[in-house]
Amino acid sequence: MQALLVFLSIAALSLLASSRALDPGRFPALARLAASGFLFVLLGIFLGPSVSGLLTERNLEALRPVMALGLGTAGVLLGLNLEPRLLRLLPRPVYLSAMAHSGTAFFFVALPLLVPLAFTSIRGWLGAVGAAAMLGAAASLSSGHSAVLAYRAGRLDRARGLGVALLTMLDDALGLGVLALALMIGAASNVGEGLGLVCLALLLGVMCGALLAFLTHSLKDLAELTTVTLGGVALVGGAAAYLRVSPLLAGVACGATLAVVGGRVAERVARALGRVERPVFLVLVFLVGCAVHARDYWAWLLMPAFVGLRFLGKMAGGRLARQLAQATLVLPPRLGYALIAQGGLALCLVAEYGMLVPGVLSRRVLDVVVMGAVVNELLAGQAFRYVVDPPKSAMASEAPDAKVAA
């Protein structure tokens, strides 16, 4: 009954999100949350055990395979975007710029919050380091959907919009790398065993990606291709959940392997998965919202610090990133304001960490990041106005040139 309630709620909210009742002109904040999928996070928090209790802890435990399948699908989609030809063509300043903005936000959040996490940890400094690293990894991630929508609507020129989207795509590497390190520290009794589990997840993904490339290379019918693709993705997530390793990392390895060895088949697989990407993402973020413990007062105390420190880190990182890539990429003058939106990968990271490293700290990390991501999404709508509107200094510098030209 509870599982049926989950899918009926998601279906009802999907209809609400696509209706005219959520006109961006009348309800801009609600429409933005619906478009990003974070409205489903709020619904999950409301229906979860910590608020209304319509879904109990036992129900969520029974839905863990569904979350694993969602994380595996997200990983495969992320890995398919790693196009080897594009990555080889990108110059070095682009990578340095992406690492600058993501790394600055990482250290702005991870280092200050390490102290309060250590004081509230029963695992000592080692557990606090892993939790602080996950907070920093979630803070380092940004979403470029605002820039892409802005240039498609004509509010931002195409070069700047694609530049922001490229930087936000490359910062995913830092988040996944920190997740792997955090799992090495906390997912097993020692670092060596944790390293083995991470390597097992990557090896599983590579094998599934090679198998999927073999099974799909000669398929022509779209329906058959979609069926085989979904079966392969389910195999990745299901096998990772059975082996108690990371479905997200296994999915990334699977998608990257398919992108490398699959050739044009990888593009067809990506289009087939694109048909189910939105509903899978909505189910996943709904379940992540259900896992939030809204009554943890320590999480409520840490969340404003997380949001504020991340905002400062993105402002400083945006300036540094623009300086490093000014000769290579065309970026907005106020780049930091375009990096406030956090995106869904941050939720995937903390959900994965909570599944494989259970405990009070991992639960608190999930609470802080999920609630902070909703706040950051609301802030991003206001902050992006500073990206679209040119700064007064730029307008003043362009005025004399216009007079000379006249």
Image: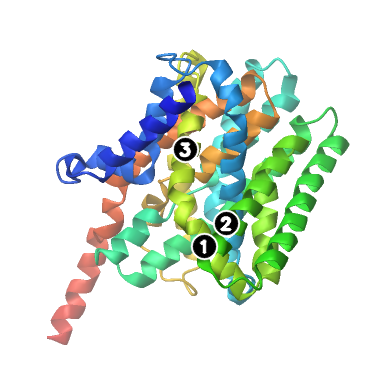
Which residue is tagged 3? 283
Which residue is tagged 1? 223
Q: Secondary structure at mark 1?
A: helix
The residue nearer to you, when weighing 82 against 163, is 82
Q: Residue at x 74, y 62 (%)?
A: 210
Find out whether the residues at labels 2 and 3 contact each other: C-beta distance under 8 Å: no
Which amino acid type is marked by label 3? Val
Estimate the x, y position of residue 37 in percent, counting from the top left: 39, 41
Q: Secondary structure at mark 3?
A: helix
How far apart are labels 2 and 1 at the CA level? 6 Å
The residue positioned farthest toward the bottom in the image shown: 405
Which residue is tagged 2? 227
Which amino acid type is marked by label 1? Ala
Upstream in the sequence, badge 1 or badge 3?
A: 1
Q: Is residue 235 above or below residue 356?
A: below
Upstream in the sequence, badge 2 or badge 3?
A: 2
